[in-house]
Image: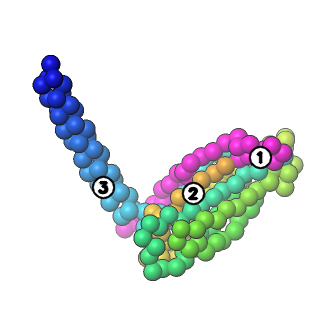
Amino acid sequence: MKLQNTNLLTIRKRFLKLIALAMLVTTGTLLGSSSASAAGDASRSTGMFGITQNQTARLSVVRDDPFFRDDPFFRVELSFVDGEGNILSQKVYEIAAGKAAFLDLKGRDVVGRSSGNRVQMRAIVRFVGTPDTRQAENCIPTLEVFDNETRETRLLLPAVQKLQTPTIE
C-alpha cells in the first residue's frame, strides 16, 4: 500500500511539473508576441461606463518596470471622453520606473452637461512619443469608479483594453 502511494505521488509531481513547464512556455510565447505588437499600439481604451453626480472615476496607470531600465521617464496621456469623443478631462504625466499616476473626474463636474443624472464616458490611456520611446508593455492601467461620500468602489476594471490601430504597409 505504501509503495502505491509513493508511485502516485511521484506521478502527480511529474504531472504538475509538466503542467508548470507548459504554462511557462505558453506565457513566454504570448509575452514575446505581445511585446512585439505593443510597440505599435498607441493607446488603450475602456468601453463606455457611467457615473453619477456623487461618484468619481479614477484612471490610474503604474509603470511596472522590474528592471528599472536606464530610461528614467516615459510620457503617458490619461483622458476621459464622452460618447461623442469630446474630452471631459485630460492630463499628460511623465512616469518614472516603479511609479504611478492617476486622473480623477468627479461626476458633479460633468453631470448636467448631458441629459439625466448620469454621464456616459470612456477612459483612454495614450502613450506619447515615438515607437522607440513608448513603453506600453511596462504600463498597467486600471479604472475605478467610487462613491464620493463612502469612498466605496462601485466599479473596477483591472486592465484597460488595447485599442487596435490600423497598420499601414
Say what amino acid the circle numbered 3 marks. Gly
Give the main secondary structure of the magenta stretch. loop
Q: Name the residue tied to disc 1.
A: 151
Q: Residue at x 29, y 54 (%)?
A: 29
- Give the residue at x 57% y 62%: 62
Examine the rendered structure and indicate whether residue 126 appears above or below residue 156.
below
**Is-magenta flag for residue 159?**
yes
Q: CA distance from mark 2 to mark 1?
A: 20 Å
Q: Position of residue 131 (x, y in %)?
A: 45, 73
Residue range (magenta)? 145-169
- Residue 30 in magenta? no
Mark 3 to mark 2 CA distance (whole Å): 22 Å
Q: Nearer the viewer, mark 2 or mark 1?
A: 1
Q: Amino acid at mark 2?
A: Pro
Q: Answer with mark 3 or mark 2, whichever residue precedes in sequence.
A: 3
User: What residue appears at the point 61 percent right and 65 percent down from the top-left corner?
Assistant: 100
The residue pinned by badge 2 equals: 141
Considering the image in quadrants, where does the N terminus appear? top left
Kindly identify which residue carries mark 3.
28
Residue 121 x, y percent position in the rendering: 70, 50
Residue 112 versus residue 148: which sits nearer the camera? Answer: 148
The quarter of the rendered structure image containing the C terminus is bottom left
Q: Is residue 86 visible?
A: no
